[in-house]
Image (tube, grey):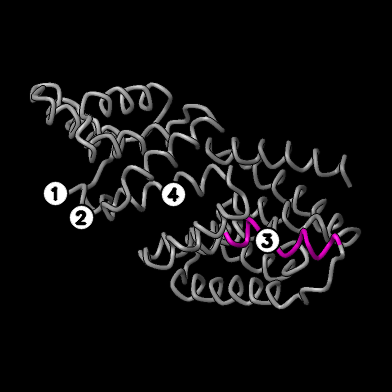
Amino acid sequence: IEAAGVLVSGVAGAARSLRKSGSTRAEQLDEFAGTVLNRMVEIDRNSIPQMVEYHLSAGRFDKAVQWCRAGWPDASERLALLWLAAARQHPSAPQSLAELESVLVKELNHQSDVPAENTDASWTASSVKGEVRMALADLYLMMGRDSQAEPAYAKVLELQPDHVNALNNSAWLMFVNQRNLTRDEGLIEHAIEVAGERPDLLDTRGCINIALGNSQAAAEDFTKAIRLGAGPDTKFHLAIALHRTGDYKNANKILAEARDDGFSLASVTSHERQ
């Protein structure tokens, strides 16, 4: 199974590359990878998450969701975020996201029903359900339900204080809602301590620096994030920081670059618009 999994990863990767170039060979490789994966799942259902990743990488979001259903709840920790990735791009996204919310809440409620006197190690581990909780928090954030996302991320951090994405998203929500900015700064600094200066973390810290009036520090964060591969939204943030430092010429230049790279005002929060 392990060897077959490595083989499938390589073949699926080759199929993706060939698909971009329009080669008919991609279909043959894709079919081969699917055949191997089906056999893997017959032997060991723990292979289902790899089946989901295979369909996700090929843009078959409906198939990915179907396999998430098939593997739930046995592989819930490995499937939760994959299901979220598939559901958000599913042809019937609203219904798919609603279904996922129901599944995640039910799974977490089931775990909270474990008797307190049960000290079995497997129960203790499974009751945490870190990635299930994270998927639910991300789902709330994606749907703009900030009042539910904030406590959901707080619960993830209560159980896993070094969860970098939960730290980053919690800090982002506080920035968006302009609450607890001093604590907000502490969250993102801890995320950077844990994971290093990732582009997304630098972008969040830059936004917080703007909110705190540290525009020059924000510009430095955004510039570094862009060098590390951050996208057009970060260029927009850099334009804001430069404008606030009085560097209007470069602010307009960076804003034009962001638009050329595909930036749209539709992607920003109301606070960013202001």
Q: Amino acid at mark 1?
A: Gln
Task: Find the distance from the CA under tag 4 to the CA under tag 2.
Answer: 17 Å
Task: Find the distance from the CA under tag 1 to the CA under tag 2.
Answer: 6 Å
For mark 1, does the 10 Å Cα neighbourhood hold few (<14), some (14 to 19), or many (20 or more) residues? few
Q: Are marks 1 and 3 in contact (CB under 8 Å)?
A: no
Precedes in sequence: disc 1 or disc 3? 3
Which residue is label 4 attached to? 169
Residue at x 67% of width, y 35% of height? 14
Q: Amino acid at mark 2?
A: Ser
183 or 132: which is nearer to us?
A: 183
Element assignment for label 4: helix
Question: Where residue 255 appears, x then y in whole percent?
Answer: 18, 32
Element assignment for label 1: loop
Which residue is label 3 attached to? 129
Residue at x 27% of width, y 32% of height? 235
Magenta segment range? 121-133
Task: Find the distance from the CA under tag 4 to the CA under tag 3.
Answer: 18 Å
Total marks in image: 4
Which residue is label 1 attached to? 274
Q: Disc 4 vs disc 2: which is toward the camera? A: 4
Question: Where residue 184 appears, x then y in whole percent?
Answer: 37, 44
Residue at x 53% of width, y 72% of height? 101
For mark 3, does the 10 Å Cα neighbourhood hold few (<14), some (14 to 19), or many (20 or more) residues? some
Answer with the quarter of the image where residue 6 lies: top right
For mark 2, does the 10 Å Cα neighbourhood hold few (<14), some (14 to 19), or many (20 or more) residues? few
